[in-house]
Image (spheres, rainbow, N blue to C red):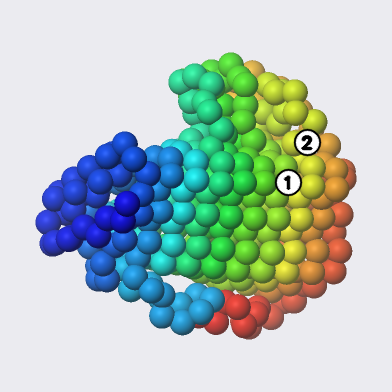
């Protein structure tokens, strides 16, 4: 069934109408009208739903005609995808200001797929498609913009434009536990993820991948960011789950970074220190490559390096170009 709700200037009413539609119990299509629509908080998106705004003007970074502007104060994502077979497209999202803290990467976002901490073992979410989405939070760097976390697989992120925020796209393992220091396992590691045509500007970081496998990032322009991207093992690496694939088959290619931070444009790390007991473990990467990337800029600290590699055996670096100039790093980012 196709739903075309009438939205008004009443943020509380808009959220109620949209959430009641999504909670009908039957999968469907939610087609949102053009314009900027306030909503008082975020929306939970269950299995089987398609959410689509009006047609985007222009290809590859074109501006959506439909925007959801959150005024919530609870730290909910504007869209929290909690089921499988979900599609989000042709939409602009303005999250409300948020500062969820170091371990709140799935909170306060424009879109979160999955969760970081679970009360009990979850079902895997699969077949999530997000494309032609803009996120705007230029004055707010306290929260991430798009988060893919925990028990999620087979996710496509295509043609995303992010302005502001902490991390443009944060991809992180999840776990069963009340908080990060009391994880009991198992842990869940995103995989089957494809990120293409990503544009991030004026954020702290373009993207990071933490304790994942079978991930492809291709074609990203990260402009005026403090850090370009990080490849990380996760602070518990693979201690709580017997999955030999973690850290395998990761391909990061054709990424340009114009960075302004103090220490590095790219960090690749293989070691992690557990928040549970302080134990340091090392993740062995396999079939993982970072290739054909351009890094433009210089650090501001006494010691800086465009690329920092820390105990990351198994990660290949190919075709990395480093410039100290700070001109535009590629045409892909010209519209970001």
Residue at left 75%, top 23%?
A: 242
Image location (x, y in percent) of residue 27: 37, 44
Residue at left 73%, top 69%?
A: 254
Image location (x, y in percent) of residue 65: 33, 73
Question: Is the Cβ of the residue at disc 2 closer than 8 Å to that at disc 1?
Answer: yes
Q: Which residue is mark 2?
A: 245
The quarter of the displayed image where residue 300 is located = bottom right
Name the residue furthest front: 1
Vertical placement of residue 153 versus 70, above or below: above
Vertical placement of residue 208 versus 91, above or below: above
Image location (x, y in percent) of residue 318: 86, 64
SS class, disc 1: strand
Q: Residues within 10 Å of mark 1 (few under 14, many from 20)?
A: many
Residue at left 67%, top 69%?
A: 219
Is residue 95 visible in the rendered image? The answer is no
Q: Which residue is mark 1?
A: 214
Residue at left 62%, top 31%?
A: 188
């Amino acid at each position: 069934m196709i739903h075309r709700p009438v939205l008004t200037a009443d943020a509380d009413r808009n959220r109620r109408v949209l959430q009641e539609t999504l909670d009908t119990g039957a999968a469907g299509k939610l087609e949102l009208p053009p314009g900027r629509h306030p909503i008082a908080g975020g929306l939970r998106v269950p299995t089987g739903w398609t959410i689509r705004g009006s047609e985007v003007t222009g290809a590859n970074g074109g501006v959506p005609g439909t925007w959801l502007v959150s005024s919530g104060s609870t730290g909910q994502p504007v869209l929290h995808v909690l089921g499988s077979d979900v599609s989000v497209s042709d939409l602009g999202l303005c999250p409300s200001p948020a500062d969820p803290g170091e371990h709140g990467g799935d909170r306060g976002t424009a879109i979160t797929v999955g969760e970081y901490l679970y009360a009990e073992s979850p079902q895997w979410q699969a077949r999530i498609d997000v494309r032609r989405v803009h996120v705007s939070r230029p004055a707010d760097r306290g929260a991430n913009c798009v988060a893919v976390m925990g028990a999620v697989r087979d996710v496509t992120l295509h043609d995303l434009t992010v302005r502001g925020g902490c991390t443009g796209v944060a991809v992180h393992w999840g776990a069963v536990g009340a908080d990060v220091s009391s994880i009991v396992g198992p842990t869940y590691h995103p995989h089957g993820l494809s990120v293409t045509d990503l544009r991030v500007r004026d954020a702290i970081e373009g993207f990071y991948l933490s304790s994942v496998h079978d991930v492809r990032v291709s074609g990203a322009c990260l402009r005026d960011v403090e850090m370009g991207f990080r490849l990380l093992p996760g602070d518990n690496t693979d201690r709580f789950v017997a999955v030999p694939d973690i850290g395998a088959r990761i391909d990061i290619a054709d990424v340009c970074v114009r960075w302004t931070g103090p220490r590095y444009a790219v960090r690749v790390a293989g070691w992690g220190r557990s928040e549970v007991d302080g134990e340091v473990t090392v993740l062995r990467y396999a079939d993982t490559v970072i290739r054909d990337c351009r890094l433009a800029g210089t650090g501001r600290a006494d010691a800086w390096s465009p690329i920092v590699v820390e105990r990351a055996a198994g990660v290949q670096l190919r075709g990395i170009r480093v410039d100290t100039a700070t001109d535009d790093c590629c045409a892909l980012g010209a519209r970001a």
